[in-house]
Image (spheres, coloured by chain):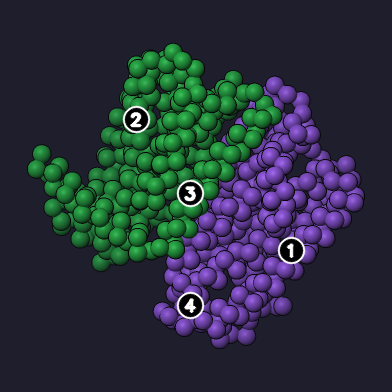
Amino acid sequence: MDALRRHYRVWLRLVRMSLSAQLSYGLGSFGFLAAKLIRLLFFFGYILAIFKHTKSVAGYSLDETVLFFLTFNLIDTVTMALFRSVYSARRVVEDGDLDYYLVQPCSPLFRMAACIVDFLDLATMLPVLALLATTWQRLPAGIGLVRVVLYAGLVLNGVAIALAMHIFVTAITVRTQELENTIRLYRDMLFLGKFPIDIYAAPLRWALTIVVPIGVITSFPVKALLGLLSPAWMLYALVLAAASLGASLWFWRGALAAYTSVSS
Amino acid sequence: MGKYLYVFQINMQSVLQRRASLLMDRVGGIATTVALYFFWSSIFSGSQSILGYSPARMLSYVLMTNFLRAVVFTDRGWEVIRDISSGRISNYLLRPIRYAAYCFSMDAAQKTVGAAAAALEIGVLILCFKTPWYVPRQASTWLLFGLAAGMSSLIFFLLEFAVASIAFWTFESGGPLFCFDLTVQFAAGAFFPLDVLPKTFQNILQATPFPYIVFFPLNVYLERLPAGALLRQFSLQAAWLCVIGWIVSRVWRRGLRAYAAEGG
């Protein structure tokens, strides 16, 4: 419990430092924030425009398709906001900062994966939540509290799987000092989650559920909300999150054991 | 001219040598293309024509954006920012070369490899998905498409060069460049054809150079423009190229005057 409290205090201090850093980088931060908003609004606008010419995509109405898109954005934004420091993992290893992390009374994984909060992503979350609330009101009546709870639970489950992927990326960086390719691969694959996984051909759909579980991260919450996800798949999602977190932590410990203080 | 050819050759070797980066680059491109391909496929499963696009034309549009992304969006601007901010550009300014031409030679090597890889990927995707593919009826269309793609590539290179030149005045030019890169991709039609947008937005975009970067070359390929419109659009593309070239040379000269070789 003491360790948890200590980590929380450290996290709060680092969050304040992240905010100061981002505020001192005015033009740059403004550009990045504007880009994130433009990407969200352009894509949203395109989906609305396309639905002027069609009634459904893979059997989903406009509101349902938008819900998939916004849920993808919600999970992606939360992940990016909380685990942004993974993107600096290579610098941390190359500059030798990891050596300092190892002698501090704080988890080195925590320092490498979660010590920066991206306030630009938090700001992007506001329009996502506003659009989500608007879309929510347009959904057909009859979605009970149970489905809403399942949706929220599977969103958190998606964030947990995304965290596991970020831990894998961090561990690979410690082992190889190579970050850009793996994180880019993850980001690019995530693009496939912008739409419902039902649009894809069966083999790809299978791959996105079992091999690279982008579908579990982004599509499962909405499918549960719409009553289209069986309990067996929900159980699978939970087991997958637990297994991927366990495997990523095991891989991280292996990477740390193999770390040779390469930059020192 | 010979020295730029050497730069081209050396960078070609460098791009081909970093096979992991190249592979990850291409996987990223394919993920985006596959997502959009299936999105449009599911829309066309209930319709034979949307906005004058047959399934063959629309799916060809989507696959060909993969080619144009490789040829156009090569992100040289980030390298320019790094060179200016680190002072490394002083090294180039002292040599008997033009920095912009040097950058373009580097870029051309990346574009050549990217174009070859993208063409191969399109072929594989057509075979795998049994895509109804639009083949231009006239042989001259290939030539005109090449011309339009070449000019669009130059337009984007110059625009990005101009935005990256902000680094002469501030260290925070990354944000504006990121914002610019994303905006251009949406406004150029790299994700969706621009004619799905409402007429007002289309008219606004037509007053900018962005549609000439992706949307126009693909309209040339898909033979959607009558001879008169084709000539007019080519003239406008060439005019934009000249105007942007002039602006870049002015910005660059002013930037060099403001340059203090900090870090160099």
Q: Residue at x 33, y 38 (%)?
A: A164
Q: Amino acid at mark 3?
A: Lys
Q: CA distance from mark 4 to mark 1?
A: 31 Å
Residue position marked by numbered label 2 in the rendering: A157
**What residue is shown with label 1?**
B240
Q: Quadrant of residue A63?
A: top right
Image coordinates for residue B196, horizontal then vertical, percent? 69, 38
Chain for disc number 3: A
**Is disc 4 on the same chain as disc 2?**
no
Q: Nearer the viewer, residue B69 or A137?
A: A137
Please tell me whether residue A179 is drawn above or below residue A164 in the rendered image.
below
Q: Are marks 4 and 3 in contact (CB under 8 Å)?
A: no
Query: Do labels 3 and 1 touch, CB within 8 Å?
Result: no
| Mark 1 residue crowding within 10 angstroms, few (<14) / some (14–19) / many (20+) | some
| CA separation in Å, label 4 and label 3 | 30 Å
Point out residue A150 in the picture as x, y percentages from the top left corner: 35, 21
Marks 4 and 3: which is nearer the front? 3
Residue A86 on image: x %, y %: 34, 51
Near mark 2 (Cα within 10 A), the count class, few <14, some 14-19 or many ≥20, is many
Q: Amino acid at mark 4?
A: Arg
Q: In front: mark 4 or mark 1? A: 1
Which image quarter holds the C terminus of chain B?
bottom left
- Position of A206 with respect to A231 (left or right) is right
Letter of the chain that mark 4 sits on in the rendering: B
- Dot 2 lies on which element? helix
Chain with colour purple in the figure: B
**Label 3: few (<14), some (14–19) or many (≥20) C-alpha neighbours in 10 Å:** many
Q: Amino acid at mark 2?
A: Asn
Residue at the disc numbered 3? A36
